[in-house]
Image (tube, rainbow, N blue to C red):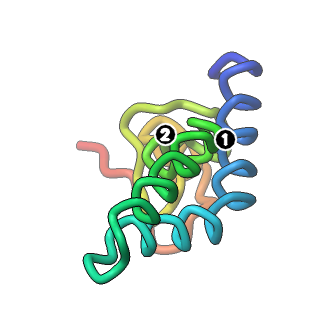
């Protein structure tokens, strides 16, 4: 199980990303538009830099929904390999059979 603080930190980042997503997209469009004057593009870059760093989507890290484990994460299931194996052994995941020989 991951530390509670790490899980909470990731949730906080997720909220910030959702809050500033539209603003970031608008500023990036202005900053990358070659037709706009250089001064306006530069101002958009400065405004983008003033936004919180944790509001960037690249700061997010995938974590298991059950345990919070950051490694060995399956995107489709949103679970780590350990949680997947436990749920599979218990028969909680339809169509998944843990092999043994």
Q: Earlier in the sequence, mark 2 or mark 1?
A: 1
Task: Answer above or below: position of 16 versus 9.
Answer: below
Q: Identify which residue, 60 or 78, lies in the foreground.
A: 60
Q: Residues within 10 Å of mark 2 (few under 14, many from 20)?
A: few
> Horizontally, is 71 left or right of 83 in the view?
left
At 62% from the left and 33% from the top, the residue drawn is: 68
> Horizontally, is 40 left or right of 86 in the view?
left
Picture coordinates of residue 30 (x, y %)?
45, 72
| Distance (Cα) linking label 2 and label 1 | 7 Å
Q: Which residue is mark 2?
A: 59
Q: Which residue is mark 1?
A: 13
Q: Are marks 2 and 1 in contact (CB under 8 Å)?
A: yes
- Asked which quadrant contains residue 23, the reply is bottom right
Split into 4 quadrants, where in the image is the N terminus? top right
> Horizontally, is 81 left or right of 25 in the view?
left
Task: Answer above or below: position of 88 versus 83.
Answer: below
Q: Identify which residue, 79 or 53, lies in the foreground.
A: 53
Residue 97 is at least partly visible in this image? no
SS type, badge 1: helix
SS type, badge 2: helix
At 68% from the left and 58% from the top, the residue drawn is: 20
Picture coordinates of residue 93 (x, y %)?
56, 64
Picture coordinates of residue 57 (x, y %)?
50, 52
């Amino acid at each position: 199980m991951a530390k509670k603080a790490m899980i909470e930190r990731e949730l906080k980042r997720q909220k910030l990303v959702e809050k500033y997503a539209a603003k970031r997209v608008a500023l990036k469009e202005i900053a990358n538009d070659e037709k706009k004057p250089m001064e306006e593009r530069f101002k958009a870059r400065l405004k983008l830099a003033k936004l919180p760093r944790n509001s960037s989507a690249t700061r997010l890290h995938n974590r298991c929904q059950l345990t919070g484990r950051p490694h060995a994460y399956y995107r489709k299931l949103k679970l780590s390999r350990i949680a997947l194996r436990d749920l599979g052994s218990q028969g909680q995941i339809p169509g998944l059979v843990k092999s043994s020989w």
